Each structure stands twice: as C-alpha cells, then as structure tokens.
Amino acid sequence: MSLIEAHALRKSYGSFAALDGINLTVDEGRIVGLIGPNGAGKTTALNAILGLTSYQGNLRVLGCDPWNSRKQLMRDVAFIADVAVLPRWIRVVELLEFVAGVHPRFDRSKAERFLAKTTVGKHSKVRELSKGMVAQLHLALVMAVDARLLVLDEPTLGLDILYRKQFYDSLLNDYFDRSRTILVSTHQVDEIQDVLTDVIFIDRGRIVLSCSMEQFESRYTELLVRPEQLDAARALKPIHERAVLGRSILLFQEADRQHLAPLGEIRTPNVADLFVAVMSQQNRTTQGVPQ
Amino acid sequence: MSEPNALSQSSVSSQLATSSILAPTRPFYWSVRRELWEYRSVYLAPLIATAVFLLGFLVSMPMLPHHRHGLSASPATQQLQPFLRPYEVLEGLLMVVGMIVGVVYCLDALHGERRDRSILFWKSMPVSDLATVLSKAAIPLVVLPAIVVGLSIVTHFVMLLVSSFVLAGSGLPVAPLWSEVSFVHNSFGLFYHLLTVHVLWHAPFYCWFLLISAWTRRAPFLWAFLPPITIAILEKAIFNTEHFWNYLMYRLAGGMEAMSTGAHSTLLGGHLTPLRFFSTPGLWGGLLFAAACLYAAARLRHYRDPI
C-alpha cells in the first residue's frame, strides 16, 4: 500500500520553481532517503507532504490532502522538520506533558525510556541542552508516537559523528519495523546508505533517480580499472569517471559484470559516489542546453 | 522483575485506551497550559503587583485606627473612603497590569513561534490552527480576567481580615467594616466590570493584536499601533476632523459608559445596566470584528512560513 502518492507536484516561489513536477510513490515499510544538493527542493517536497506548504498537483498522504487536513494527518505522521525547532524555553517534562496531552498516539512512558538512555535531564530547559541532546530529545518524542509515517528533514544536521551514528542506530533498533515507513532527507549520504531501502535523488525540483537499494545494487557497478585496460573500459561508456590515488574508478549503469570483470576489480558503488555521478551528469546536460 | 514490568505494561495499555479517545477539549486545555509555561508574566506580573500593593497596605496599617477615630463623626458614605481607596487602587492596578500583559502577550503570541521556528514543532502535533489561535485568545479573554478577579477578591478578603485585626486590637468595633464594605457585592461588581469592559468590549483589540502578530514578519508593536495613529493624524491634518480618533476612544471606553450609570466605579454606587450594555450595537459589531480577526489569524498561521 502506498502511503505517499505525488503526481506532477509543483511549487513555485515567484519565478523560481522549487518543485518542478514531482512524481513519487512511497510504500509502507520502506525507509526512503531523499537526497539532493542544497536548494534542490528536498525541504519543499517534505513540507508539502507534511501539510506545511501549499502546492499544485496531486498529493495524497495516507489518503488525505495534507494541506487541508494537517490536523488529521498528524495523528498518523510524526516529523522532525528541521534541527532545533523545539521551543528553547520549554522544560523536558513540560514537553512530555504537552505531547501526551494533545497526541492520542503518544506513549509517554516509551519516550521516558528512550530519554533514560541519554543524558537529557527531565527538568532541563531545551536551551540548556547541547545540540546533540536536543536531537535525542526530539527523536525520543517522535519515536514514542505510534505513527505510520515518520518524516525527517536533515535530522542530524550539525551534529557530530557520534550523535549522528546513535541517531540512526536508535531509529533502526528501537523504532523501525515493517509496518512503519520513514522518509528522510540528508546530505550525509554515506551514513544512511545501510539504513535505506530506497533512494530518491532530487535536483532543481525534479526527481533524477528513484530506485530501491536492490535495484541500485544490480543496476550500478563500479570498476577499479587496471591502468592498461582504461581505454577498453572507457569504450563501455561509463556514466562517470574519477581518479583515486592514481587509479581510475569508472561507474557503469546496466553494465554486464562479466564484460567488466576482466578489466579490473568490480565493486558495488556507494550511494554518495552515484550521487556525485548523477549530479555531474545533470550539470553537463543542463549546461549543454542554452537557457 | 517481571511483575513491575507487567504492571507498567498494563498501565500503558490502559493509558493508551483512555488517551485514544481524547476529548476534543483536551488539546485546547493543554495549549492554554502551554501558553502559561511560555509566558509566565501572565500570572507573575499580577502576582508581583498584588504583593507590592499588599506590602504597602500592611505598612500603612498602623494608621488605620487614627483614620477610624477621625471619621466616626462624618457621614456614612465618607466613612467608606479611607478603606475603599486602597482597594480601588488595587483593582485599578491589576486591571492596568492585566491589560498591558494582555497586549504584550497578544503581539508576541503568534509572532514568537514563527521567529524561533518552534511553529514547525507545534504543527507536528494534531492540533488545528484554529484551536491554537483560540487557546492564545483565551489568555487575554479568559485567563487574565480570571486572574485579576481572583487576585482582587482574595486580596480584598485579606485586607478586610488584617483591618479587622488591627481595629479589634485597638478596641474599635469591627462589624461596620464588613457591613459597610459589602464583600460579595464588590466581588460581583468587579466580575461584571471585567466581563463587560475587559473581555467583551475590549475583545476586538486583543484579537486585532493577535492578527497583527500572525501577519507581520517583524516589529508587531509598530504594525499594531502605528497605522491607527497615522490614520488619526492624517485625518486631523487633511480634514481637520477627529472621527477616527474619537471612534478609537469609543472602542476603548464605550463599554464603561454602557455597562453602568453614575460613577464609573462599580464600588461606589454605580448602577449596573447589563441590558443597555448587551443591546449596544457597538458591542456586537466589535465582537464580530474580533471573530473575523481570530479566523484570519488562524488562516494566516496555516499559510505563513516561519520567519
């Protein structure tokens, strides 16, 4: 069953198209990574899904139109829209009381169990917590909501590596099961590659790639070429080429691994490398076309 | 080890069972409490004003028997004055404090949450924009008046008690104190005054300030006060008339004129005229305007991005 269905989703700010016709389907039980450079439209897309911004086109989230039924939607959707949006004046215990008061699907004791594993004090104010602790607190809140869809927009921006790692570890170990769906946008592609079941690349308001991790692994091949085989490998039309420590690494799409094997060492590329490849391809095609 | 676990499990599930059928008023109730957590001045300012006043009153207490001695020969209405004056001061003080706190609160209520981006968190909760705006309107229209009335009544009572002790201590009769200052009558008069003037008649102001705070990107104070003042000044400069200014003054003070006759004080012999108050067209026009402001503020909260 698809939780999110977007068709020809558009959003413009003046003459700038933040979303330029997005088609998107997210099924139940998936962990989808929305990956794109700054200003690509990630946040706009997530905000549209969360009912925080208006849009043109068709969008259904859990069967609702998010812009007009945010309140109903928020019973089944939890989100972290941005780092550091928890009000700075509030105390942790007040935050727990408030969410327990207004949210029918919030399990306060669960949130307290998550918090007990951290150093966040119950009577601290949010302004007294470090950035990493605020992120832990927010994550504890959303994980204690029995939501069908969790949306995270750059949830670990500005956190150090330990907190980032912890964040995704607890998300996977303490929260995710097959009935939940997570949509996460991030820059730090490497860290969430193993977490994701699907990736979506977005650039300039358009989706430039969308596939499951299984498709990704079968579709893309990376070849660490032996120097003497470089020309032969290039003849097979790699989509990207980069040099690391004097050796060339070529990225192939839909290539026959048996043809590549004699030319060097075959590896599965990581998402970040594919991202760079796809983005530089994008830049080439748009630069070639006169505006 | 397993027993407490089972216990907490069952309490969790019973909690879930009760909370999954949340009463529709619960989000509203918690939203109002949320406001009081954020804006402590809503209750602290009146409390501090009352404390300062009571301190002054207690300091002046040793003088009371002298006043009573001096006044025992004068007519009954004048006898009320020395005791009622401080109480009237307190009422006026609390009303002014309540109004100032209310205006300051309203101008920040829907602006601050966009400024610090916490609106993105509040909007992740299943609370509608209208419920949020109404809970914020409840601060100047329900909570503050209730605090003013409650504090006044309690303080009045404390003042009567303390005065009684002082009078009794110096051998003067205590009974007249309680009969000449009708505690119940005053409390009711105060409640009526707050309800008519401060809630119903002034509601358009507070709701207008909430609307400004939902609309403006910066300087809500300037946007709330500058345009009306500019209009008044322009009118004076161009047409040499003061209709707009007079109208504003009517919106501010018209409720006082309609709610009672005679002295404006509810304490000193003012005659309450609720019928006249509730049949004043200006009241209903103002309330309509207030409702429109709240609706518009809720729509703006829906549309506006964080600043």
Image (cartoon, coloured by chain):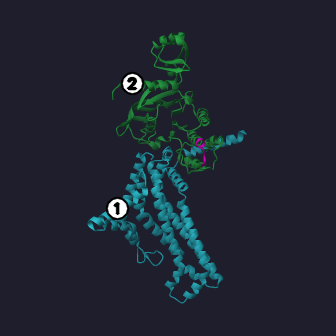
Instruction: Tell me the quadrant of the picture where the C terminus of chain A can be found.
Output: top left
Q: Is residue B279 visible?
A: no
Amino acid carrying label 1: it is: Thr
Residue under label 2, please give it: A285
For image coordinates 46% across by 42% down, the residue present is A72
**Chain B image colour:** cyan
Residue under label 1, please give it: B230
Q: Position of residue A247 (x, y in %)?
A: 54, 17
Q: Is residue A131 magenta?
A: yes
Q: Chain of mark 2?
A: A
Q: Position of residue A257 (x, y in %)?
A: 51, 13
**Chain A image colour:** green
Numbered disc 1: secondary structure: helix
Amino acid carrying label 2: it is: Thr
Numbered disc 2: secondary structure: helix
Q: B214 and B261: which one is in front?
A: B214
Magenta segment, which residues?
A128-133
